[in-house]
């Protein structure tokens, strides 16, 4: 019953996002064809607007848009006459997803390790060292870290390519730049959660029974401490996988971020709406899956609306 309610809530949330996005885009000042007003005759502009249903009343435009969405059609791009929004998303998603998955893997792996090391060595040198790395990761923005990585690893040491996209080597530096900040946040989350879990009575009881530190950490510590971290990882995964605009711009990666930024400058409303809805839908779906995954990670959590 809980899963059904959450599924209905997810669908309602997606509908609200679609509706708000549609309304906001329609009330933004300006016209995607304003730049052509001095070049094309008024009759031609009217025909173009009619092609994109912009001459219809707002309720009719909304109904047509929702009808197309039901068929998974995000519409045509205004500025790119030969490509649809679906084509643009399909073109940009592989690069963004590859970069995001690599960055998320790096952030989770090293973030969890740093957090566990810091928690098990609370107020000891290793704790301070791990948290120092975390503070540096949070303090240095990705748009500052990225040029530094390019300067040393690509330009001076010539270990990796400068920019562009095409091979695994091209993805290493942007993945590191993208993973630094979330890795630091995951480390701090995991440290706090792990310290709290390791001070629980059942951990002390298990320790008194003779379980080793490794057994305590693996069987009881990580499993319970990771739940708060997963709540943070869900939205983070969406941000990383669907594309980070600044990193993609710095490293000349042909991902969704590039197309989204270009669509804003070009007032390509269908692309802006389509990518926004695409991002939001992935976020809502992942949050839904995270709710369900809690039960798999910790069987003591019951998937009931009353929490019992």
Image (spheres, rainbow, N blue to C red):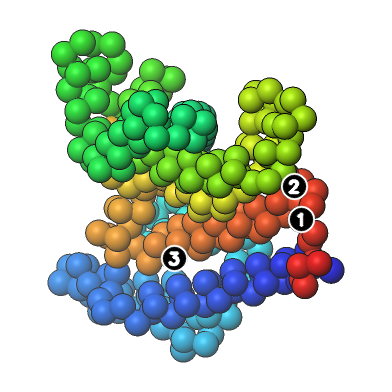
Q: Secondary structure at mark 2?
A: loop
Relative vertical location of residue 245 with respect to residue 67 in this rendering, above or below: above
Relative vertical location of residue 277 with respect to residue 254 in this rendering, above or below: below
Q: Which residue is mark 3?
A: 273
Which picture quadrant has residue 36?
Answer: bottom left
Answer with left or right where residue 212 lies relative to residue 125: right
Tell me if label 1 and label 2 are in contact, CB under 8 Å: yes
Q: Nearer the viewer, residue 247 or 139?
A: 139
Q: Which mark is residue 298?
A: 2
Q: Nearest to the eye among marks 2 and 3: give it.
A: 2
Cα distance between the residues tagged 2 and 3:
38 Å
On the image, the x and y values in percent for residue 254 come to 37, 38
Of pointers 3 and 1, the one earlier in the residue sequence: 3
Q: Residue at x 35, y 41 (%)?
A: 181
Relative vertical location of residue 176 with respect to residue 3 in this rendering, above or below: above
Of pointers 2 and 3, the one earlier in the residue sequence: 3
On the image, the x and y values in percent for residue 100 come to 46, 38
- Crowd tier of the residue under label 1, counting other residues whose Cα lies within 10 Å: few below 14, some 14–19, many 20 or above: few
On the image, the x and y values in percent for residue 243 come to 41, 45
Cα distance between the residues tagged 1 and 2:
6 Å
Q: Secondary structure at mark 3?
A: helix
Q: Residue furthest right?
A: 1
Answer with left or right where residue 18 lies relative to residue 130: right
Q: Nearest to the eye among marks 3 and 1: give it.
A: 1
Q: Which residue is mark 1?
A: 301
On the image, the x and y values in percent for residue 174 come to 34, 31
Q: Residue at x 58, y 80 (%)?
A: 63
- Crowd tier of the residue under label 2, counting other residues whose Cα lies within 10 Å: few below 14, some 14–19, many 20 or above: few
Relative vertical location of residue 175 with respect to residue 203 in this rendering, above or below: above
């Amino acid at each position: 019953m809980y899963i059904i309610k959450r599924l209905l809530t997810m669908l309602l949330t997606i509908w609200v996002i679609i509706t708000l996005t549609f309304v906001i885009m329609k009330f933004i000042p300006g016209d995607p064809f304003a730049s052509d007003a001095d070049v094309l005759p008024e009759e031609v502009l009217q025909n173009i607007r009619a092609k994109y249903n912009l001459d219809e009343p707002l309720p009719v435009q909304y109904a047509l848009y929702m009808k197309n969405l039901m068929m998974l059609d995000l519409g045509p791009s205004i500025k790119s006459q030969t490509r649809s929004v679906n084509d643009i998303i399909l073109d940009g998603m592989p690069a963004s997803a590859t970069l995001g998955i690599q960055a998320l893997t790096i952030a989770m792996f090293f973030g969890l390790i740093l957090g566990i090391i810091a928690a098990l060595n609370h107020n000891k040198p290793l704790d301070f060292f791990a948290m120092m790395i975390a503070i540096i990761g949070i303090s240095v923005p990705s748009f500052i870290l990225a040029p530094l990585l390019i300067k040393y690893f690509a330009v001076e040491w010539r270990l990796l390519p400068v920019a562009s996209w095409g091979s695994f080597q091209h993805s290493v530096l942007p993945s590191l730049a993208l993973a630094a900040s979330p890795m630091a946040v995951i480390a701090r989350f995991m440290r706090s959660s792990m310290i709290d879990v390791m001070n629980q009575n059942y951990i002390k009881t298990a320790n008194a029974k003779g379980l080793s530190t490794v057994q305590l950490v693996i069987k009881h510590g990580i499993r319970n401490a990771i739940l708060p971290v997963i709540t943070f990882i869900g939205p983070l995964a969406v941000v990383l996988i669907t594309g980070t605009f600044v990193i993609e711009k710095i490293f000349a990666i042909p991902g969704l971020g590039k197309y989204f930024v270009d669509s804003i400058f070009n007032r390509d409303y269908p692309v802006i709406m389509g990518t926004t809805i695409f991002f939001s839908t992935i976020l809502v779906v992942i949050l839904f899956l995270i709710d369900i995954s809690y039960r798999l990670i910790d069987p003591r959590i019951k998937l009931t609306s009353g929490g019992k």
